[in-house]
Image (cartoon, rainbow, N blue to C red):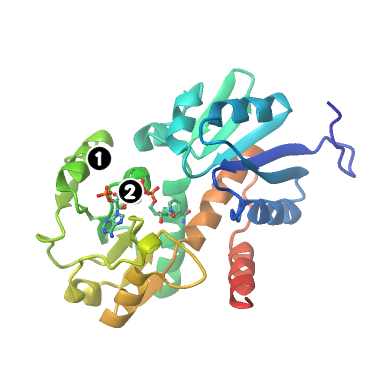
Amino acid sequence: MTRAVDPRGGAIERYAVIGHPVAHSLSPVIHRAFADETGEAIDYVARLAPLDGFGASVEAFMAEGGRGLNVTVPFKLEAFDRCTTASVRARAAGAVNCMTATPGGIAGDNTDGIGLVRDLERLGEMHGIPLAGSNVLLAGAGGSARGVIGPLLDAGVARLTLVARDRAKAQALVHSTQSASLVEVSSFDDLGAGHDLVINATSSGLTDASLPIARHILASASLAYDLMYGDRPTRFLIDAQEAGTRVTADGLGMLVEQAAESFAIWRGIRPSTAPVLAMLRATRAAR
Ligand code: NDP
């Protein structure tokens, strides 16, 4: 296979985001912006894998000389099983969103949780809402909730409450992250007040559904954060704004931060995230 050559004489190394669907992914735009800023010679594209052909697609990409893959819906769990080694945070999440070709096979990592934490810390600095020492309410018992529990605890939150419509599922999830003694589990009906941050890690935004969180709980929170992002605020963010939550934010910043962590793993250099986030927000506003 002929390898592309960058103007400085080195080989251009190839990366991709793999998913199904994947055409909507912002990852190519984000990584190309990181490459421009850092001067790293990389090519980054979106690759569609058949729903029953994730493993073969990964093998084909790596056989073509691919250096790394970001993994998106619905393959993060399968990616974990396909890796030769997995980082501590990937094992805690039980999922991989960052695969790296190494001489010994594929190394798996999960950058979603640290991406969320970095974005919460950025927002915290901007608005005077420190993450460390805060009381956090996390809604959801799916893959992303599992992946962010460990990083939130590592960031020094004082109290973490997990709420889900299926309490038993939430309980099992907390056990699977080995943090049962550190996380309170609640049903929506039993939810108490006193949360500084309320984080929506459910996919309620896909159906424009409200979460059954009482208005006074949202009103007393300093920050409401939805992992989901899109052209319009989710119902959860609208509910929070109407209840009077001081600051609301979607998950676009998390997306950029998790990408920066992948870039740093692959290239050994950490790109600036603020200009890329500003560029994405400006592009969306112009639509
Ligand atoms: P999963 O499908 O793994 O889990 C979704 C969870 O949401 C389930 O626990 C489900 O409950 C719960 N849920 C769905 N609808 C409702 C509702 N109306 N009320 C209460 N609970 C509900 O999804 P993920 O965890 O992978 O992703 C969740 C969200 O996070 C998605 O919107 C995704 O786009 C976003 N995300 C954003 C990222 C970013 O970089 N910004 C990264 C990763 C995810 P049940 O278990 O009962 O079915």
Q: Position of residue 168 (x, y in %)?
A: 15, 43
Q: Residues within 10 Å of mark 2 (few under 14, many from 20)?
A: many
**Is residue 98 left or right of 211 when viewed as pictured?**
right
Residue 102 visible within the image: yes
Badge 2 is on which residue?
A: 145
Q: Position of residue 64 (x, y in %)?
A: 73, 27
- Residue 283 is left or right of residue 230, and the answer is right
Indicate yes or no: mark 2 CB to ligand 1 under 8 Å.
yes
Among the 4 quarters of the image, the one containing residue 65: top right
Q: Amino acid at mark 1?
A: Leu
Q: How many badges with numbers are in the image?
A: 2
**N-terminal of the two: label 2 or label 1?**
2
Q: Position of residue 283 (x, y in %)?
A: 64, 71
Front position in the image: 117 or 16: 16
Q: Which image quadrant: the C terminus?
A: bottom right
CA distance separating discs 2 and 1: 9 Å
174 vs 3: above or below = below
Residue reaching furthest to the left:
190
Three-letter code for the amino acid on which mark 2 is drawn: Ala
Task: Relative to 271, say whether 19 is above or below.
Answer: above
Residue projecting furthest to the top: 104
The answer to whether marks 2 and 1 mark residues whose Cβ atoms lie closer than 8 Å is yes
* Residue depicted at 83% across the width and 26% down the height: 1
Q: Position of residue 109 (x, y in %)?
A: 49, 35
Q: Secondary structure at mark 2?
A: helix
Q: Residue at x 30, y 73 (%)?
A: 222
Residue at 51%, 55% in the rendered image: 255
Q: Residue at x 57, y 36 (%)?
A: 50
| Label 1 neighbour load within 10 Å: few <14, some 14-19, many 20+ | many
Numbered badge on residue 4:
none
Residue to which mark 1 is pinned = 173
